[in-house]
Image (tube, rainbow, N blue to C red):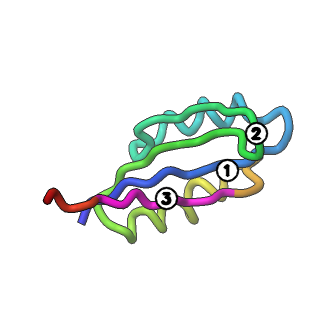
Amino acid sequence: MPLSAFILVKTTPGKDRDIYNKLKEFDEVIEAVPVFGVYDIIIRVHVKEDSDLDTFVFNKLRRMDGITETMTLIIAHYDEE
């Protein structure tokens, strides 16, 4: 089942711009937004199934040099009433 998620990303100081530009190259990333606050970048991703989200987060995102922490928030889809 397809799913979407927001992923909050913390970066090493000074690496945020490079990471932001690299994130936009991933097919899974629909949108990347730099932000001020506890996290440095918020990305919205769309994948075909939950195992694809695991692969993206653990094998691509967290292996990027300069990413120190992530928090994944899977988007809930309410049925229409």
Q: What segment carries the magenta color?
A: 70-77
* Disc 2 residue type (three-letter): Gly
Give the Cα separation between the discs numbered 3 and 1. 11 Å
Q: In the displayed structure, would residue 66 be above or below residue 58?
A: above
Task: List x then y, in percent, for residue 57.
Answer: 54, 60
Q: Which residue is mark 1?
A: 64
Q: Nearer the viewer, residue 77 or 22?
A: 77
Q: Are marks 3 and 1 in contact (CB under 8 Å)?
A: no
Q: Nearer the viewer, mark 3 or mark 2?
A: 2
Give the side of residue 61 with respect to residue 79, left or right: right
Give the Cα separation between the discs numbered 3 and 2. 24 Å
Give the side of residue 66 with respect to residue 58, left or right: right
Q: Which mark is residue 37?
A: 2
Task: List x then y, in percent, for residue 21.
Answer: 60, 30
Labels 3 and 1: the sequence-earlier one: 3
Q: Residue at 55% across / 39% down in the picture?
A: 23
Question: 10 Å neighbourhood of mark 1: few (<14), some, or many (≥20)?
Answer: some
* Disc 3 residue type (three-letter): Phe
Quadrant where the N terminus is found in the figure: bottom left
- Residue 60 location, quadrant: bottom right
Check the image and name the residue furthest to the right.
Answer: 13
